[in-house]
Every structure is written in C-alpha cells, then in structure tokens.
Image (cartoon, grey):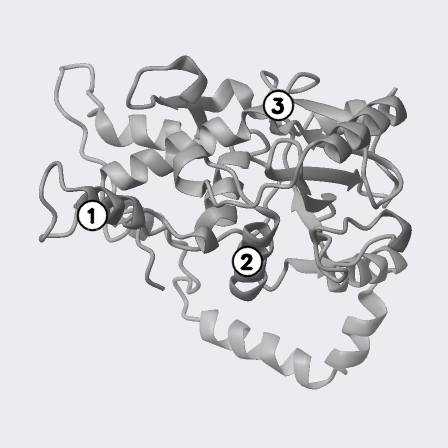
Amino acid sequence: MSSLLGSLRSAREWAMPTLKKSAFLEQGVLTPEEFVQAGDELVYKCPTWTWEAGDESKRKSYLPADKQYLVTRQVPCQNRVSAMESDMLMEQAEGGDGDDDDDWLVSTIIQRTEKALNLEDEFDMLDEDGEVIEKPTPDTAGGENDKSEAPTTTDADGDGDDDEYADMDAFEDDNILEDDAAAVTPAQQQADKDDEDHTIKVRTYDLSITYDKYYQTPRVWMIGRNTQDQPLTGEEMMEDVISDYANKTVTMESHPHVSGPHASIHPCQHGKVMKAIVRNLMKNTPPPAETTEGDVDGEEAAMNNGPSVEMYLFIFLKFVSSMIPTINYDFTMEVTANTSK
C-alpha cells in the first residue's frame, strides 16, 4: 500500500509545476530555493541536523545534488505518548479569522508528580482542632526530638572511651584493602560493571525533512528503533504520536530516499497552519513608525516585518512537536518576527 502511495505521490509531484515566486508570508509555503535557505539556517543553528544527498537515481532536479533532504539521527524518545495523554493538556490557538482550518494544537505535558507538588503547596494542612499545621523546614526537621533520642556511647562507669579506642586498635591489625576485596562477590562485581556502563536505554528515531513539490512545504519522516536497536513496527511508532493524528495525519509510507517503513506527517495542512502562525507573529509585531494606514508602501513594509524565510523550519518543527511531543529533536532557537538577523 505504501509503495502505491509513493508512486502516486511521485506522479503528482511530476505534474505539479515548481513554485518560483515566494509566498511564505502570504500562503505559508516555500519555493525549493527557500527550502534550501531555511535548511542551511537549521543546520547552522542546530548541528545535529545535516544535509543528505540521498540516492542519486532519486534526486530531484529542483534541489541541489548535495541538499536533497535534512536528517537528524539517534533522537531519544523516552516516553510513550499513549501512556502520557491522560496527563496532557491541549491548548488551542485560534487564527484571527476564526477559520477552523487555521487552528493548531500545542501540547503541554504536566507530570503527575508536578501536579501533586502544586496541590500540596496550595493548601494548608489542619489538625483535629482546625489549627494550621506548620510545614517542617530543612532547618527545623528532625529537631529536639532527634536530640533526645540520640543514643549515648558512654556508660555509668566511664568505660565507653576505652571501648572506642579498642575498636580502632582492631583495625590496625587487619589489612583493610584485602578484606574489602574479599568481600566483593561476583554479583557485586557485575553490578559495578553495569554501573560503569549505566545508560538509560530508550527508543531512538531518525527524523528527516524532504521538500514536497506538490504541497510546496517541508514534509517530516521518521523511523524508529527499540531499546535492543531493532526496527520499530508501524504500530509501535504510532505509540509515539498523539492519538488524534495517529493513522490519520501521520501514516506509514515509503521514504523517497531511505529504505524501511517510515511514519510520515502528511503535509496537506502545513501551508494553512504556517500561514496562521506567521499571521499571528506579524500581528504581535508593531509596524514601523513611519507607516501610515492605507499607504501601499506601508502595507509592503508590514509584510516585510514578518518572520524571515530562515526562521521557517524552526517554526515548522515547533508545530510538528505538538504531534510527536516525546521525540526530543533539536529545534532550539528564539523565534523573532523580524527580517533582520
């Protein structure tokens, strides 16, 4: 099925003319040249991402031979989304015109322990008489009661000091190093060896970004491996996708360059979503002081005041993280709505 979809996608892209004119701010899409420009910025700011040339027989003529797609490898994924969705709050940011197609979701994960701590700090504890119980602080914890219960090492006839020094004399006659070595059992030796190689084993993903000529936007692909470094099945990869998107927006398809089953985020809504995000960024950025309402030049200046093309993939990956929130890929950069760098 995935091979059939791949063939249809290739035929559709072949029939679609290549976008030549920039429409980033107006439609949320990119030309191939802008995709390369945005990719160069991502690679520069986040070195975990690199350009790949891909299979020579499958290279796209509208992209440089050595910049066919972006990839980041061995991305950790410690938790399953399916196990965390009960602790997840979905915040919906609506577009300015109220169009449902422009709505997009950003996931905020709240751990159970964090919520428990917040509740404990928010309410006072009361005793049987309704009096507020003061919470112990590190300075007062284990105070006088601990002192009163502390055991004494001396007895009535004053022989305690002699016993203490007698115990120290015993150590002088023994080879402490030999005793410690003899006391280490094979099981403890294995445990020590495990501690030296103590690494939290988690799922890992290789994420890649291609340019979709038909939708004129980036497209994300991911392939995962389990803790034994074996490939994940499609069903297992869907465990790391928000359930609202699994097997709907995110489906299993054939990668244009890399073999193996890949989960891919369908780009049909990417342009609309990016348009809404860019519009919100521009709305929150004050126009230039010399601009006047109704001035044609002023309207063009307002458009130029939006985020630059170089920022596209950082904004895009932030949006994608709302669908795969537990895959911790790098897109760290402050998004500024300004064309100057």
Q: Earlier in the sequence, mark 3 or mark 1?
A: 3
Q: Image check: 278 left or right of 131? A: right
Which mark, residue 297?
1
Q: Which numbered disc, 3 or 1, marks the residue closer to the eye?
A: 1
Return the residue at label 3: 83
Q: Mark 2: which amino acid?
A: Gln
Which mark, residue 19?
none
State whether residue 331 appears in this view: yes
Q: Earlier in the sequence, mark 2 or mark 3?
A: 2
Q: Earlier in the sequence, mark 1 or mark 2?
A: 2
- At 69% from the left and 32% from the top, the residue drawn is 16
Q: How far is the residue under mark 3 from the one under mark 1? A: 53 Å
Question: Front-most of 190 and 69?
Answer: 69
Question: Residue 336 location in percent, x, y?
Answer: 33, 52
State whether residue 159 appears in this view: no
Return the residue at label 2: 37
Q: Are marks 1 and 2 in contact (CB under 8 Å)?
A: no
Whether residue 25 is situated above or below residue 44 in the rendered picture: above
Question: Residue 219 location in percent, x, y?
Answer: 65, 37
Question: Front-most of 240 and 69?
Answer: 69
Q: For the N terminus, which image quadrant?
A: top right
